């Protein structure tokens, strides 16, 4: 699954060509375990914590984190999924369509929301997600967990929990799957 | 990419385009259930509703849809406009266009007007009903409602009952239902069928009682009272006796079948008052879905950055 920051993707699409594996499946598992512990530590437990995965890359990570939190603390945290297509600031500039229906199973008022995405890049997806969350109620706090922070931020956004900091060029692409993380390039199909 | 994107006929969409609209509608149905049922997707866009024919639900539905996408809306109603002073359609369109609007939602009593408007305007044009011809967003919301209630449109048997001849809802509905793989039967007296049905992908029957037990969807059309003057029917009571969905007829419906109506209903004519309030009558659900479907259409035309299933 390619990361969702598509601003560098050619308008008519491209093919992801892998160049180097950055993390394997085991590395990914260890990073998820560590982030889960950090979430528990930061929030002094899991009272009122809700995980919200961003469509599409953040959703499987959110469910894996929820499993991990159940194993560590014995608490079954609520998991939601959020698609930010309608909140993006580049609507009309390039094709923007929701990947899936948003599902937030609990009222967010007074809860601590941990937003989860696979790759943090410009920060624009997270900006859109913060606006979307506000429409579901006033969360007590919002934290951000990402598997890969690849830099190149265009907005003042900083993750609370990071799997791996990965310096990249702007035109590179990062692909996160359950089998690991790969760095590569997008080759236009045309 | 084509310069302007319009929704004029449901036939332009094809099965893929209809699927795309329905899929996106799911997202807007979810949005409608939130505390704040509004998203900023079309902020800064302006949608004009240009209605040369009376309408409440379609116009309100489009305007609600536009507002829920944070677009600005303007209403043009013929009775208070310069049309009363004799302004031509072309001048009206050019005036509206000069104001820099992004979409024009047009309804007109003459078939084909939306195509003419699209030629004159640089905005996206949406057909909200042209004469006896087409009403694409109605067909889309009907497809969505059927999918929601019956799990899909493909393979379903749909009877469209009533004034087929004068009905744009019947035409657009038939095109959309058959595009998605449904079987359509048109049920009406001969006087309310078009003179020729060549090329229509539908079966025809004049016997509602024979068709009813075999269908998954009964789609009732409004008996347009203004047509009674044309002496196409002996009387409304005569019509009800043969083609009205009375309580007795509704009892012959198959298990799980649903009853639809585009509104406004003539209770007691094409549908018995109590039948319209049964749980298998999904008429208010159609209206509710109408807003979400129109949000999907507006978003695809103005926001998604690409034509609907080119």
Image: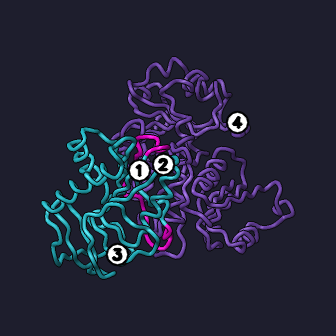
Chain colours: A cyan, B purple
Distance from disc 3 to disc 4, alpha carbons, whole Å, reads 67 Å
Q: Is residue B96 visible?
A: yes
- Which residues, given as a range, are shown in magenta? A89-111
Q: Is residue B81 above or below residue A106?
A: below
Instruction: Bin the neighbour count of mark 1 within 10 Å (Cα to Cα): few under 14, some 14-19, many 20 and up.
Output: many
- B115 with respect to B99 (left or right): left
Label 2: which residue? A139
Q: Are marks 3 and 2 on the same chain?
A: yes
Q: CA distance from mark 3 to mark 2?
A: 27 Å
Asked if labels 2 and 4 share a chain, the reply is: no
Q: Secondary structure at mark 1?
A: strand
Name the residue nearer the viewer: A144 or B190.
A144
The answer for which chain carries disc 3 is: A
Contact, mark 3 vs mark 2 (Cβ under 8 Å): no
Badge 4: few (under 14), some or many (20 or more) residues near its Cα, within 10 Å? few
Looking at marks 3 and 1 on the same chain, the residue that comes earlier in the sequence is marked by 1
Q: Is residue B176 visible?
A: no
Local packing at callout 2 (Cα closer than 10 Å; few below 14, some 14-19, many 20+) is some
Residue indicated by mark 1? A113
Tag 2's secondary structure? loop
Q: Position of residue A114 (x, y in %)?
A: 37, 53
Measure the C-alpha gap from mark 2 to mark 4. Answer: 54 Å
For label 3, the residue is A151
Q: Position of residue B95 (x, y in %)?
A: 75, 71
Q: How far is disc 3 from disc 1 in space, using C-alphas?
A: 23 Å
In the rendered image, residue B274 lying in the magenta stretch gets the answer no
Marks 3 and 1: CB-CB under 8 Å? no
Q: Choose mark 2 or mark 4, whichever is in front.
A: 2
Which chain does the residue under circle 4 lie in?
B
Give the quadrant of residue B100.
Answer: bottom right
Q: Which residue is mark 4?
A: B225
């Amino acid at each position: 699954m390619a990361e969702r920051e598509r601003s560098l993707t050619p308008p008519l699409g491209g093919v992801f060509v892998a160049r180097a594996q950055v993390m394997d499946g085991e590395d990914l598992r260890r990073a998820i375990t560590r982030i889960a512990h950090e979430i528990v530590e930061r929030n002094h437990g899991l009272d009122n914590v809700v995980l919200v995965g961003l469509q599409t890359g953040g959703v499987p990570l959110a469910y894996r984190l929820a499993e991990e939190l159940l194993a560590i603390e014995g608490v079954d945290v609520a998991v939601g999924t959020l698609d930010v297509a309608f909140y993006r600031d580049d609507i009309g500039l390039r094709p923007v369509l929701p990947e899936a229906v948003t599902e937030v199973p609990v009222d967010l008022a007074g809860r601590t929301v941990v937003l989860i995405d696979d790759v943090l890049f410009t920060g624009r997806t997270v900006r859109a997600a913060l606006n979307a969350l506000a429409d579901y109620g006033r969360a007590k706090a919002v934290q951000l967990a990402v598997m890969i922070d690849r830099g190149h931020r265009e907005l003042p956004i900083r993750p609370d929990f990071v799997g791996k900091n990965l310096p990249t060029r702007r035109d590179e692409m990062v692909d996160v799957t359950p089998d690991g993380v790969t760095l590569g390039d997008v080759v236009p199909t045309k | 990419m084509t310069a302007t994107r319009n929704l004029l006929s449901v036939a332009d969409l094809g099965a893929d385009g209809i699927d795309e609209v329905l899929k996106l509608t799911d997202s807007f149905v979810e949005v409608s259930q939130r505390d704040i049922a509004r998203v900023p997707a079309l902020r800064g866009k302006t949608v004009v509703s240009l209605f040369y024919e009376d309408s409440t639900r379609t116009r309100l539905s489009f305007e609600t849809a536009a507002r829920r996408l944070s677009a600005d809306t303007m209403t043009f109603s013929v009775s208070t406009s310069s049309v009363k002073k004799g302004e031509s359609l072309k001048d009206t369109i050019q005036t509206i266009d000069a104001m820099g609007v992004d979409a024009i939602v047009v309804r007109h009593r003459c078939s084909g007007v939306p195509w003419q408007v699209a030629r004159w305007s640089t905005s996206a044009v949406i057909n909200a009903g042209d004469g006896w011809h087409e009403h694409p967003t109605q067909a889309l919301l009907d497809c969505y409602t059927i999918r929601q209630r019956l799990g899909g449109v493909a393979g379903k048997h749909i009877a469209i009952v009533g004034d087929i001849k004068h009905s744009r809802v019947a035409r657009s509905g038939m095109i959309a239902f058959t595009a998605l793989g449904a079987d359509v039967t048109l049920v009406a007296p001969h006087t309310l069928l078009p003179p020729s049905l060549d090329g229509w992908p539908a079966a025809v029957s004049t016997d509602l009682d024979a068709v009813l037990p075999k269908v998954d969807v009964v789609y009732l059309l409004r008996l347009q009272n203004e047509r009674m003057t044309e002496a196409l029917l002996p009387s409304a009571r005569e019509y009800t006796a043969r083609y009205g969905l009375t309580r007795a007829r509704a009892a012959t419906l198959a298990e799980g079948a649903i009853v639809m109506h585009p509104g406004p209903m003539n209770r007691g004519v094409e549908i018995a008052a109590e039948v319209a309030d049964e749980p298998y009558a999904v008429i208010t659900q159609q209206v509710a879905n109408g807003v979400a479907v129109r949000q999907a259409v507006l978003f695809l035309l103005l926001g998604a950055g690409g034509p609907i299933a080119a």
